[in-house]
Structures are given as structure tokens and as C-alpha cells.
Amino acid sequence: MSDGRAVLVTGASRGIGAAVAHAFASAGDRVAVHYGRSADRAEEVAASLPGEGHVVVGADLADAEAVRRMVDAAADGLGGLDVLVNNAGVFEAHPITETTYEEWQRAWQDTLSVNLVGAANVTWCAVQHMLPRGTGRIVNVSSRGAFRGEPTHPAYGASKAAIIAFGQSLARALGPHGIAVTAVAPGFTETDMAAEALAGAEGDRRRAESPLGRVATPEEVAAAVLFLASEDAAMASGSVLDINGASYLRM
């Protein structure tokens, strides 16, 4: 097996996840590119990564047994697991004043089953591979919405706040085992998922929220993830790094 760390990135077939996969591969690491539905796109991402030893793994994160098989396949293909990046997420509009009770329930179920419960299950499975090594890094991709609220996507905002609390609990639990747990909280980012929200006048307004006059690129978020997963960031365990261009400030 080649040098470098073994890294699993969920939701890596596009957007931030694909940029994170590229960042780790460019640093000499081996990457497991996870996908939920887009196998072809995940294969394209993996084929474009520098270096060798990368693998593609698929699973619906709402399926606990599929998650276990996927994480084990990633560890088998990479020769272990050193880093987990919980990036996969669902972003489904369901404003409380405009949805039926049935739509409301479905949106919460769909969102939490992937963004929170799915990430928690991936983490449990990944940690089983990290514990024997006595070291590891877990980086959770949260959101600015965890702090400022998401009025039309409340389940998303709740899930992204919860994953921070989840990660901080694990930072306390896993520190004695040499495993550090952190989070990044991006604002709007230039991805295909955000393309509609960043189009036209609404896009201009959202870019103007930052004094920099723009939103982040996926590569900027990936750079933050790469740093938090590094040995230099061990004492950052439990922290949340905002990547929103001062569009939202908190104490």
C-alpha cells in the first residue's frame, strides 16, 4: 500500500465533497469516494484524483446496514481508515407555513436520516477502524445555518446544529484514543447544489452578505477540512471553523 493516509469522504461525487477528495489526494493520501446515488460521477471523481490507491464506495446513508458495509469496504480498499469527512447532506425546502403535515414529516425524516443519523452511523463504523491504530481525524461538515437558522429548511438547520453537538461529544470521548473531532461551517458555496440559490438577484444579495462580496469556493472549504484533519490541528479538537466570509458572525 502506498504512503499517505486512508481517507473516507462521504458525498464526494460532486461539490464540496469532490473538492475535499481532491485536496486529500493532492496531499498524497488515498481516498474512498462515497456516493449515495451518482455512481458514475463518483467514478469520474476517483479517476481524476492524483496519486493511486483510491476507491469508490456507495451506500444510502439512511440504511444502517448499507453504511456498515460501505465503511468496511472503504477500509478494506484503502488498508484502514485514518480520516473521516462527514460531508454528505440533504437540503430539502419545507417552510412550516407552506407544507402539509405529511410533507413536513417526510422532510424531517429524509433530512435527519442522512445528515445526522447517517453521519453518526458512518462515524461509529469508521471509529472501529481507527481505535486499533490509536489515532484518527473526523471532520464534520456543518453549516452557517446551524447558528443563524434556516427558515425554509428547518430540518437542515437542526441537523447541522446537531452534528456539531455530536462531534463535540465525540471529541471528549475519543480524545484519549488519539482521535480528534472538528467541524467546518460554510456559508453559501459555489456548487451545483447551490446554483439556483446563487442565480440572479437573490444570488447577488447572498454574495453581498459578505464584506468580501462573494461566497466561498469548494476548494476553500476543502482547504479548511485538510487543515483540521492534519497533525498540526490536534488541539483544535472540538472546535468549529466558520467559512462564510464574515457573512454571519458569532461569539
Image: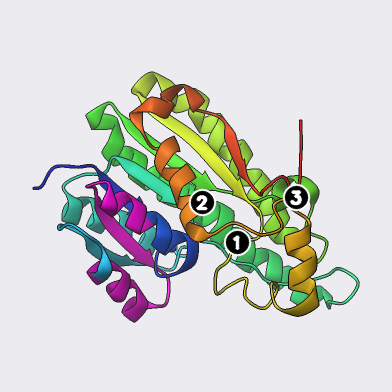
- Which SS class for mark 3? loop
For label 2, the residue is 221
> Residue at 38% of width from left, 26% of height from top?
232
Q: Earlier in the sequence, mark 1 or mark 2?
A: 1
What is the number of callouts on the image? 3
Taking 195 as reference, is 215 above or below it? above
Q: Nearer the viewer, mark 2 or mark 3?
A: 3
Which kind of residue does numbered mark 3 sit on? Pro
The tag on residue 145 is none
For label 1, the residue is 189
Q: Earlier in the sequence, mark 3 or mark 1?
A: 1
Q: Which segment did they paint magenta?
A: 21-47
Q: CA distance from mark 3 to mark 1?
A: 15 Å
Q: How far across and down, in percent of the image, does residue 57 sit?
A: 29, 65
> Residue at 28% of width from left, 74% of height from top?
43
The quadrant where residue 201 appears: bottom right
The quadrant where residue 202 appears: bottom right
Viewer-side residue, 46 vs 214 = 214
How many residues crowd mark 1 within 10 Å: few (<14), some (14–19), many (20+)? many
Extreme-front residue of the structure: 212
For label 3, the residue is 211
Q: Earlier in the sequence, mark 2 or mark 3?
A: 3
Which kind of residue does numbered mark 2 sit on? Val
- Which SS class for mark 1? loop
Taking 170 as reference, is 248 above or below it? below
Q: Nearer the viewer, mark 3 or mark 1?
A: 3
Q: CA distance from mark 1 to mark 2?
A: 8 Å
Which kind of residue does numbered mark 1 sit on? Thr
